Amino acid sequence: MNISKTERRALDMLSTGGKIVLERDSRNRPVAADFISREGWFLEGYGFPEFQSLRAKRLIVSRNGGDYAISRDGALSLQKSRQAARKSGAG
């Protein structure tokens, strides 16, 4: 599966221990998303649209009702993306 550069950056942050924290409305629907690294830094420019894209592609998953983290499929896609970038010499 092809992933975009923004998706790759978000997955890279998640693979090193980051997480996605959601803000929910009164009906428990997600309305905003914060991408947070393991050091506590926010990933600037990433929000709810990026969260929806990653979730639709099943690259992230929430386990036991917790914060979202990278899924097995996400880790595999990230690995393939890194290999392709290495072969092409870009990145």
Image (tube, helix red, strand yellow):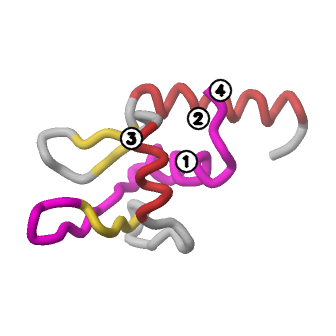
Residue 8, horizontal then vertical, whole percent? 61, 46
Identify the residue position indicated by label 2 in the image.
Answer: 78
Secondary element under disc 3, as helix, strand or loop, is: strand
Q: Earlier in the sequence, mark 2 or mark 3?
A: 3
Q: Earlier in the sequence, mark 4 or mark 1?
A: 1
Report the mark closest to the observer, 1 or 3.
3
The stretch in magenta equals 1-29
Secondary element under disc 4, as helix, strand or loop, is: helix
Q: Amino acid at mark 2?
A: Leu
Q: Residues within 10 Å of mark 3 (few under 14, many from 20)?
A: many
Using the image as rendered, state which of residue 39 and residue 47 is in the foreground: 47
Identity of the residue drawn at 34% across and 45% down? 69
Residue 86, horizontal then vertical, whole percent? 81, 33
Q: Is residue 50 left or right of residue 79?
A: left
Q: Residues within 10 Å of mark 4 (few under 14, many from 20)?
A: some
Q: Earlier in the sequence, mark 4 or mark 3?
A: 3
Is there CB contact under 8 Å for labels 1 and 2? yes
Quarter of the N terminus within the rendering: top right
> How far is mark 4 from mark 1, CA to CA?
12 Å
Identify the residue position indicated by label 1 in the image.
Answer: 12
Residue 29, horizontal then vertical, whole percent? 19, 60
* Badge number at residue 60: 3
